[in-house]
């Protein structure tokens, strides 16, 4: 029977960071994962270049039932700390937009860095290894693995959420929390494309593949202004992925496809300059051709733009910058980048990520009810929460 100080379940971003930090303290660490390779979500992130953090990361960029919970971890291990680690390993990177940092090369550089750091500090990585049973013992935990049994004083659950099941994602971490009496906030897909009902899809089918550079998408008081893409199932793109974390079934979202542009005034000027042009031609001066045509057809206004009254132009302007749409649903965990909800932060210590009622048990990363915006924020939560647990486990 093996015995180590710390077992980390999950060789993802948070789990590997925790293993590194615990190893630095001289703790014997075993990281187990049922996958055949470590850091699979790191590997596919950012189009294969890994958006590993965001220079603007702060608590306001995260969703949780307790908005204050993430403050301690994010302040104790910041984006600057992780950027310094990347720099020490000689990994070139660049800022893309809105503070998002990407590797110049491959995301596998980040994985290699983490694996090298684990090895350097003595952490063992055991892949293709399932956790079949966890039991509490007098001095810690006993885990029945596919490869045998191991005992540990500290157990860190870092196995992520339900998003992207084809990569092996499951709700295992939530089951562990429930086993030991911790509460779990209802989970749902987040940072995910939204879908339309069949009637809306039939009407918007010609727009599949059409993108708008900077749509302002809102739900309630929350608003994001980033690119938007029409798909064969609904809408996607950064602005939609962002708002999906706030949207709930049955709610409308508002979309401004030309934020910052007074469309009524633009149409009035087009009417004055060349009243003989068709409405879709006037719209096409500011919008993609297919989208301009779709809006003109939906408006059902006769004649050229010279024939349209101010009231009619205002109606068209509202279709561009005041579009209200009620999505039918989302693409679900299949394409969701993260899972919203998770282990209830009321049952965790914000400084150490330890379970309040179960000594030696920790939860970090996506499995916790802390979800970041799109743009490197969720990786920063992984680094920060993993670092904190690594100081205590």
Image (cartoon, rainbow, N blue to C red):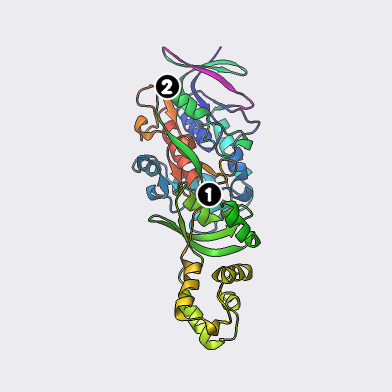
SS at circle 2: loop
Is residue 192 highlighted in magenta? Answer: no
Residue in the foreground of this view, choosing between 214 and 298: 298
Q: Main secondary structure of the magenta part?
A: strand
How crowded pointer 1 is (Cα within 10 Å; few <14, some 14-19, many 20+) is rated as: some
The residue positioned 44% from the left and 30% from the top of the image is 363
The residue positioned 54% from the left and 36% from the top of the image is 162
- Where residue 61 appears, as percent x and y from the top left, is 42, 50
SS at circle 1: loop
Distance of mark 1 from mark 2, alpha carbons?
Answer: 36 Å
- Where residue 80 appears, as percent x and y from the top left, is 45, 48
Vertically, is 285 above or below 347?
below
Please identify the quadrant where the N terminus is shown.
Answer: top right
Q: Is residue 366 visible?
A: yes
Q: Which residues are magenta?
A: 125-138
Return the mark for residue 328.
1
Disc 2: which residue: 180
How crowded pointer 2 is (Cα within 10 Å; few <14, some 14-19, many 20+) is rated as: some
Q: How many marks?
A: 2
Please identify the quadrant where the C terminus is shown.
Answer: top left
Q: Quadrant of residue 343?
A: top left
The residue positioned 36% from the left and 30% from the top of the image is 347
- Where residue 223 appears, as percent x and y from the top left, is 43, 58
Q: Is residue 54 visible?
A: no
The residue positioned 41% from the left and 22% from the top of the image is 360
Residue in the foreground of this view, choosing between 205 and 174: 205
Vertically, is 251 above or below 275?
above
Q: Is residue 244 left or right of residue 40?
A: left
Vertically, is 261 above or below 380?
below
The answer to which of marks 1 and 2 sits earlier in the sequence is: 2
């Amino acid at each position: 029977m093996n015995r180590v100080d710390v077992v980390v379940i999950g060789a993802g971003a948070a789990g590997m960071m925790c293993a590194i930090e615990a190893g630095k303290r001289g703790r014997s660490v075993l990281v187990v994962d049922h996958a055949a390779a470590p850091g699979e979500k790191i590997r596919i992130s950012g189009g294969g270049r890994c958006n590993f953090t965001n220079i603007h990361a702060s608590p306001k960029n995260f969703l949780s039932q307790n908005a204050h919970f993430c403050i301690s971890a994010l302040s104790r291990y910041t984006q600057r700390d992780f950027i310094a680690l990347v720099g020490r390993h000689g990994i070139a990177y660049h800022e893309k937009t809105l503070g998002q940092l990407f590797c110049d090369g491959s995301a596998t550089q980040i994985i290699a860095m983490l694996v090298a750091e684990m090895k350097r500090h003595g952490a063992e990585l055991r892949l293709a290894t399932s956790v079949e049973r966890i039991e509490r013992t007098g001095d810690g935990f006993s885990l029945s693995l596919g490869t045998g049994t191991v005992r540990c004083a500290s157990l860190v659950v870092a196995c992520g959420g339900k998003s992207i099941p084809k990569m092996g994602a499951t709700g295992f971490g939530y089951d562990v929390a429930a086993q030991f009496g911790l509460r779990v906030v209802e989970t749902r897909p987040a940072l995910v494309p939204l879908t339309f009902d069949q009637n809306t899809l039939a009407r918007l089918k010609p727009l599949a593949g059409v993108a708008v550079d900077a749509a302002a998408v809102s739900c309630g008081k929350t608003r994001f202004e980033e690119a938007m893409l029409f798909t064969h199932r609904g809408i996607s793109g950064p602005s939609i992925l962002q708002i999906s974390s706030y949207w709930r079934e049955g709610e409308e979202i508002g979309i401004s496809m030309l934020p910052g542009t007074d469309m009524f005034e633009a149409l009035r000027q087009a009417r004055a300059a060349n009243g003989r042009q068709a409405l879709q031609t006037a719209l096409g001066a500011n919008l993609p051709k297919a989208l301009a045509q779709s809006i003109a057809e939906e408006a059902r206004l006769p004649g050229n733009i010279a024939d349209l009254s101010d009231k009619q132009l205002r109606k068209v302007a509202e279709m561009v910058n005041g579009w209200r749409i009620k999505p039918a649903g989302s693409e679900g965990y299949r394409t969701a980048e993260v899972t919203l909800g998770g282990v209830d932060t009321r049952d965790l210590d914000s400084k150490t990520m330890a379970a309040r009622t179960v000594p030696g048990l920790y939860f970090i990363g996506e499995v916790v009810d802390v979800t970041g915006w799109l743009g490197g924020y969720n990786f920063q939560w992984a680094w920060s929460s993993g670092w904190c647990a690594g100081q205590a486990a």
